[in-house]
């Protein structure tokens, strides 16, 4: 499934760095819910720093970015689904 959040973008969703830095596709709900992120298009493009840097990256210590993306992902999902569906699939309410 294409991203329902930033499909077609050539910038880092977080910092706006352009594609010359190399963008990664980040599945917003990763770990056990990665497949659900893929199924529903809940993914964004991130530069290497915002994605994997130990301090600034969403897979590093940047829990603020991680939580913000969880909220953005849930909001995007709820454009076409109910909150009950979100919680049934992802197991939690982030909003
Ligand atoms: Zn970035
Ligand atoms: Zn990722």
Image: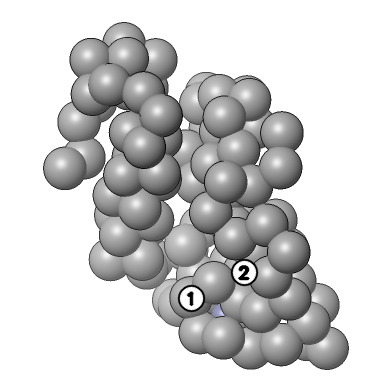
**Can see residue 33?**
yes
Give the left or right position of residue 63, taking residue 30 as reference. left
Residue 49 spot, x, y in % from top left: 60, 79
The spot of residue 25 in percent (x, y) is 70, 56
Q: Earlier in the sequence, mark 2 or mark 1?
A: 1
Residue 67 rendering spot, x and y as whole percentages:
29, 54
Report the image quarter containing ligand 1: bottom right
x and y, in percent, of residue 26 in the image? 62, 53
- Which quadrant would the N terminus be assigned to in this image? top right
The C terminus sits in image quarter: top left
Q: Is mark 1 within 8 Å of ligand 1?
A: yes
Q: Quadrant of residue 82?
A: top left
Badge 2 marks a residue whose secondary structure is strand
Residue highlighted by disc 1: 14
What residue would you read off at disc 2? 46
In this rendering, the answer to whether 43 lies above or below 93 is below
Q: Are marks 2 and 1 in contact (CB under 8 Å)?
A: yes
Give the side of residue 5 with respect to residue 19, left or right. left
State whether label 2 is within 8 Å of ligand 1: yes
> In the orientation shown, which residue stands out farthest toward the top?
88
| Mark 1 crowdedness (10 Å alpha carbons): few <14, some 14-19, many ≥20 | some
- Indicate whether 49 appears above or below 61: below
**Residue at 21% over, 40% down:** 94
Q: Residue at x 62, y 69 (%)?
A: 46
């Amino acid at each position: 499934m294409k991203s329902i959040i930033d499909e077609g973008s050539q910038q880092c969703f977080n910092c706006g760095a352009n594609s010359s830095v190399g963008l990664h596709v980040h599945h917003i709900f990763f770990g056990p819910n990665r497949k659900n992120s893929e199924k529903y298009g809940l993914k964004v493009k991130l530069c290497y720093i915002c994605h994997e840097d130990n301090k600034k990256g969403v897979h590093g210590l940047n829990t603020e970015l991680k939580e913000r993306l969880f909220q953005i992902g849930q909001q995007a999902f709820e454009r076409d689904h109910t909150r009950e569906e979100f919680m049934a699939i992802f197991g939690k309410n982030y909003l």
